[in-house]
Image (cartoon, rainbow, N blue to C red):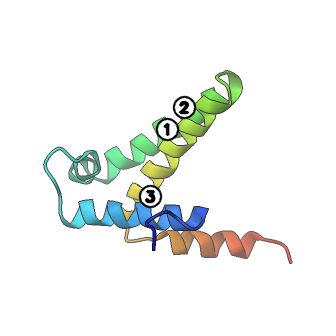
Amino acid sequence: MTNEPKSASDTIDRLYATILDRRDHPREGSYTAQLFRQGNDEMAKKVGEEAVEVVLAAASQGRERLVSESADLVYHLLVLLAAHDLAPADLYAELQKRMKP
């Protein structure tokens, strides 16, 4: 058996598990643990900053930069969700509600 993700949602779920581990068992030098120490307002601010960087990348910085900044945004959003005891499954459920049959 391999540790390779099976799907995009598997990748998100595994990243989220790592984020929870850093929240629950902070490690010295962990950026994720640092975000949790800074608190909700700083985490929310970071999501906003990353969102702006996604917009700028989409406007004029090319596909690679857009992918990179989008990954940063998803990571920071997952950290913020974890801080509110929300999981990717909550996000998946909301997205499924929005899909037309």
What quarter of the picture does the N terminus occupy? bottom left
Whether residues under marks 1 and 2 lie with C-beta atoms below 8 angstroms apart, the answer is yes
User: Does residue 70 sit above or below 26 in this rendering?
Assistant: above
Circle count: 3
Sequence order check, earlier mark of 3 and 1:
1
The image quarter in which residue 92 lies:
bottom right
Q: Residue at x 57, y 66 (%)?
A: 9
Q: Amino acid at mark 3?
A: Leu
Q: Position of residue 64 (x, y in %)?
A: 62, 31
Figure quadrant of residue 91: bottom right
Is the residue 7 above or below the residue 36 in the image? below
- Relative placement, left or right, of 87 versus 20 is right
Residue beneath label 3, please?
A: 78
User: Around disc 1, counting alpha carbons within 10 Å, would you say few (fewer than 14), some (14 to 19), or many (20 or more)?
Assistant: many
Q: Nearer the viewer, residue 67 or 5?
A: 5
| Residue 20 located left or right of residue 33 | right
Q: Is the residue 75 above or below the residue 65 in the image?
A: below
Residue at horizontal 29 percent and vertical 50 percent from the top: 32
- Residue 83 is situated, as x and y percent measured from the top left of the image, at 34, 62
Residue 55 visible, this angle: no
**Disc ID at residue 50:** 1
Query: Residue farthest to the front?
Result: 1
